[in-house]
Structures are given as structure tokens and as C-alpha cells.
Image (cartoon, rainbow, N blue to C red):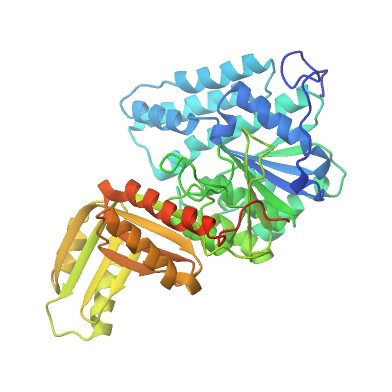
Amino acid sequence: MVKKVNAGALAESQAPLTCPPHLCYNPAMIVMKFGGSSMAGPDRIREAARIIKMYAAQKPVVVLSAMGDTTDYLLEAAEKALTGTVDLGAVRKLHRGAIAALGIDVPGLDSLMTEMETLLTGMSLLRELSKRSRDYLVSFGERLSVRIMAAYLNTHVLPARAVDAWDGGFRSDSDFTKAELLDSVWQDIPKAFEPYTSGRDNAIPMVTGFIAKDDTGRITTLGRGGSDLTATMLGAALKADEVQTWKDVDGILTADPRIVPNARLVPEVTYDEAAELAYFGAQVLHPRSMNPCRKTGTLVRVKNSSNPQAAGSVIREKHSGPVPPVRAITSVKHVKLIDIVSTRMLGASGFLAHIFNQFLKWNISIDMVATSEVSVSLTVNTPEDLTGLLEDLRKVAAVECHSDKAIVTIICDAAHSGSILAAAFAALKKQNINVQMISQGASKVNVSMICDDSEADTAVRTLHEALFDTLLAAGLLIKGSVCT
């Protein structure tokens, strides 16, 4: 039931947000995704609700992550259950506190809390936490989140309904903790949302991100970037005009602002550039989450829920205007550099095949690689013990593993790589930073290099100053927003 407006939150006396100029083309349908930081507490929920209300005329479908630290609290509760203690105190406090502050009633809340407690009791009796039960447990975060937001919006005269992803057509395989969506979602999602897209149901769907069900009805989670994948899958399958992912930064920046305080907004990047940024440390959509939009050409827009008037950044297939030579600089710390030199008379093909088969055997991903006929240097970024892998590699090669390394990546146009690298190495030389390995990706939009962890932040600042400030002064870097 839609209730009258309560004083305090989403008050009509608040100055309404106006549509920013860059969004006033009035898309017919959008998908909006709000992450955990945008749902961290009552004030952030109110702000997210204001943003949803601002876009209500554009027929939004909203994807929500769990509130704040809910997933961590649930996993901590699981660890306690393994010692025989059932404790949902932190989860109850966070959600009931938000509900009280928002002045709402949430249908189904008590039954979800009881279900969680029953699950944890089972874990405490069995002293076991399987991947399947872990997925089941963490799913409650998103399920609580959508019910709270739907209740809040309904209380303030904006019809909304909570939708568990599996009721919205999301089916996956049974690879718990890192499930992949089935191809059937392309047909199932439009069917599930047809009452809303056709106009027969005007309640805005609040959809759980990150979760799905397999064909036997067991709850799964979609792994890294799961909530973003939920949003982009919805946008692509429903043929939305754009997917908006609302974060706690103004968009994609030229560098991490904690390292480079004067980092600038990047108005526009391609899917390939965004993927490379995400692979190498930037807080952008996970590469797998962009695959649905790649297939349909759906535009993705990164926005700031704390600063909704900011222009944001656009991710699309191709640049819509002149392309700056350098887009951004990012870094990943705590990686390992492995140098491998053949000790046998193996041909290049046999040597490389053996090396990469060992990584496949141990299920360890490689980030960067540089090769010659009988030597390979590569990096891995994993907390897993590499002892077994290194022992297998040493059967045919001399192997050295170096810890505490960092990958610094320049997202750029490979057509300008000569001048970009010349400026980059000249700047790094002045700071006495030694580059230990270099690699250019097959996508032709990045150049990555290895240095020590302790040098990474200095390297990023140095490269940013050399490649952005210098290029900007020379008029080679484009300023301002990209018109969409």
C-alpha cells in the first residue's frame, strides 16, 4: 500500500534534484545500480531514493547491493557458527536501525531474519560451511536491501516492489561463489519484467544484485562484479537506453585521487579501456560485467550517488569524438614477478606449452607476460600458495619468484606508444625508478610495467604529471565532458 509522506525523509520541502544537462535527452528506459556504499545507512538510502525519484519518468529498473558491511557481517556470523555460536547481532542492528531511522515497516523482514538464524543454527550443528551454504547465507544481504528500499519508496508515494533476482529470470550454473549466468536469461528476463516494461505494472522493480538460482533452485552468487553484472544483464536483455552504476566517486578518473589529488574526470572510455582499467586496479565495472552491454551496444554511465549533479563518465563501444592519447593511469600492488628460464633443449612452442599448462593445472591466472624463445617473465596476483606451481616449473626451468612488486598501467592509444613511452621513461628516470618488465596488451589500449611496491605511488604520480599535465599544457589532452 502507498502511504502518505512521513515528515523527515524524502520530504517534499527538499529542493528537488534537477536533471543535469548531459542527461536531459530523456532516455525511455534505464537501469540504475547502487552499490553497498550508496546503501550504507539511512542518509545514503534517502539520497538514493531521491535519485531514483528524479529518474522515475525514465522507467528505471533498480539493482541494489547489500547495505554497507552486511556481507562481511554475514561471513563473520558464519565463522562464529562454526564454533557453535549463532549471532546475528551486527546484521540485526544495522538493518533494524536503518528501518527505525527511516520510519518504515518492511514486510517479510522477520521471516528473513528467522531463515538466516535457522541456516546459521544448521552450520553450528554441522560445524561446516560449504560454498553452497555460503552463497545461501550472503544472499540475505541483497534480499534485505531491496525490501527496505521498496518499503521506503512506497511510504513516500513512489510505487516500488522488491524482486529477488531469480524471480526476474536470473538463472545460473551451479559453480557456487562464482556462478555464470545461463544463456536462457536473455529470454527469461524480458518475460519476467514484461508487466513493468509494457506499463501494466507501474511499481519500480528493486532487484537483488549479485545472486541467482541454478536449475535445481539453489541460490548462487555471481562472483566478482556480480551486482554490476546483474545491472548490465538487465540493461542488455531489456534493451534499456543506458545502465547507470552509482558509486561514491564522480566517475572514472585519470588516477586514484588518494594517490593523485588533482586526478581529472575521464568523460568517456571504450569497453576495452574500461576493462583494462578494471583489470589493473581501477574501481570501474568488472570486465565480465560489461559483456552483456558489448553484445547489444548498451551505453554504461558511471555516476556519484553523493554528487548526482556531476557529469559522470560514459562507457561505450567507440569514442564519440577526438581521442586523447592517454586516458588514465592505474596500479596494482602486492603482485609476484616470476622469471622462468628453460634448462632443457626445448623448442619455444614446447617450452611455452609446458609453462602455461602448469598455471592451468594449479588454476592460477597470469596478469602480464613477456617472452623470448627460452625465457618467460610473468606476474600473478593471488593470495594462494605458489609452492606446488613453482616446484612443477622447476622441473624444466630455472625459476625465481619476486614478491612485493606492482603493476603500473597506462591506458592509452597504442598508435602513440612511442612518444608516450619516451615521456614516461624520461620521467621515471628522474625519480630513479627502475622498470623491471614491460608489456603491451593485445587490446592495444594499455602499456603495463613492473616496479617495486614501494615505488608504485611515486610512479603513478610521476607518470600522471608527465603525461597529463605536460600534454594538457601542450594542448594535446582534451578537457571537459563528451557530449552524448
Of 280 and 384, nearer the camera is 280
Going by the image, does 389 lie left or right of 238? left
Residue 241, given in percent of the width and then of the height, sits at 75, 54
Residue 326, given in percent of the width and then of the height, sits at 50, 61
Residue that lies at the very extreme toward the front in this rendered image: 474
Please report the residue visible at 46 percent of the width from the left and 30 percent of the height from the top: 119
Going by the image, does 202 lie left or right of 249? right
Going by the image, does 329 lie left or right of 477? left
Residue 375, given in percent of the width and then of the height, sits at 21, 75
Going by the image, does 84 lie left or right of 155? left
Picture quadrant of residue 298: bottom right
Of 240 and 373, nearer the camera is 373
Please report the residue visible at 45 percent of the width from the left and 72 percent of the height from the top: 442
The image shows residue 373, relative to residue 208, as above or below, that is below
Of 406 and 58, nearer the camera is 406
Q: Where's the N terminus, which quadrant?
A: top right
Please report the residue visible at 50 percent of the width from the left and 59 percent of the height from the top: 471
Number of marks: 0
Residue 401, given in percent of the width and then of the height, sits at 18, 59
The image shows residue 460, relative to residue 476, as above or below, that is above
Residue that lies at the very extreme toward the right in this rendered image: 200
Please report the residue visible at 42 percent of the width from the left and 56 percent of the height from the top: 466
Asked whether the viewer can see residue 172, the reply is yes
Asked whether the viewer can see residue 182, the reply is no
Q: Where's the C terminus, which quadrant?
A: bottom right
The image shows residue 299, relative to residue 4, as above or below, that is below
